[in-house]
Image (tube, rainbow, N blue to C red):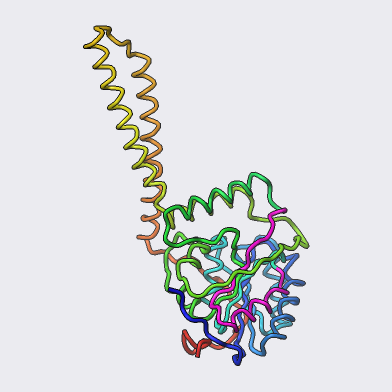
Amino acid sequence: MMQPMLNRQHLSPSISCVIPAFNEARNLSKLLVEILATLTRLSERVELIVVDDGSRDNTAAVMQDVCRQHPQVVYLKLSRNFGKEPALTAGIEAAQGDVVVLMDGDGQHPVSLVPDMLAKWREGSDVVYAIRSTRLDQSSLQITLTGWFYKLVNLGNRVKIPANAGDFRLMDRQVVEALKRLTERNRFMKGLYAWVGFNSTAIDYEPLPRTEGSSNFGLRGSLSLAFTGILAFSIAPLRALTVTGLFLSMLALGYGLEVVGEYFITGIAVPGYATIVVGMMFFSGIQLLSIGILAEYVGRIYEEVKQRPNYLVSQRIGSGLPAAQSSDKSAE
């Protein structure tokens, strides 16, 4: 049952904006000034947290200069490249605002949409997430694979992950605190956003073209993230193995009965060399595939058991907002 929507029209929340960045030095200077200008029009208490995920360009130098000019900016430099999901986690855990906005560092998320998101929050939504209306910047293969992924990950899953919804979103403080309680190592943030629940509203947006450079997240990265998402939020592969095993067992039993029947009824010995060889190769392939899928799940259990941190921060510049007083501050 859906929770009643809170009316927050009278509230003026503090705002944190989290931006993970990897080799985005050419985009950050202009982008951060534009985002700050928008945020400061919406609230007097803002912070802009940039998480440097082990960039190899001059992101550090650019951010040091930006932090000197704008005290609202916080720079978190991770000790190495941990990936976008841990970088987002670092920013979320550092954010202290009553509401937290997540954006990419490539400039493709329109900052002009943030006021609309905040308006939806004031109307009572705890999460306002943006859905891509088009995927013109992606290949037809990537678009097709994305569609298949959402169908597979949502197959038989109680938690439905919205298709075409990315990390661009605004979240209430209580949602942020809920996410901070999820300490798993194999992180698929889109799934975690859906898992925590809360009142959510979707709005459409058109991705902007990159101002500089090219995407660091291509087809290979998308496939790796999709694989993590499926293993973290779906047992459909394991169920598929069960169904496949049952089907093959019934098929083998039927074929065995046919061979026995033909031998006793017609008296003809069925030549079986080719059948045996093909059958052995086929079943060996099925077994190796099954073991591989099981190994992926076991490997992720191994990563969880080690309890290593999701990220390590090597440098921080800027103090940001003071610590949040309570997890439901914005809902009072």
Q: Between 46 and 8, which is closer to the camera in this rendering?
A: 8
- Residue 83 lies in the magenta stretch: no
Rendered image quadrant of residue 30: bottom right
Residue drawn at point x = 55 percent, y = 71 percent: 314
Q: How many marks?
A: 0
- Residue 123 lies in the magenta stretch: yes
Measuring from the top left, give residue 70's x and y in whole percent. Answer: 71, 83
Using residue 164 as the reference point, say whether residue 239 is left or right of it: left
Q: Residue furthest bottom?
A: 10
Measuring from the top left, give residue 181's x and y in whole percent. Answer: 42, 73
Q: Residue furthest left?
A: 264
Rendered image quadrant of residue 76: bottom right
Check the image and report above or below for 323 versus 165: below
Check the image and report above or below for 31 versus 122: above
Rendered image quadrant of residue 61: bottom right
Span of residues in magenta? 110-136
Q: Between 286 and 115, which is closer to the camera in this rendering?
A: 115
Check the image and report above or below for 211 versus 142: below
Residue drawn at point x = 45 percent, y = 59 percent: 186
Q: Between 213 and 266, which is closer to the camera in this rendering?
A: 266
Q: Between 89 and 266, which is closer to the camera in this rendering?
A: 266
Using residue 26 as the reference point, say whether residue 131 is left or right of it: left
Using residue 330 as the reference point, say whether residue 302 is left or right of it: left
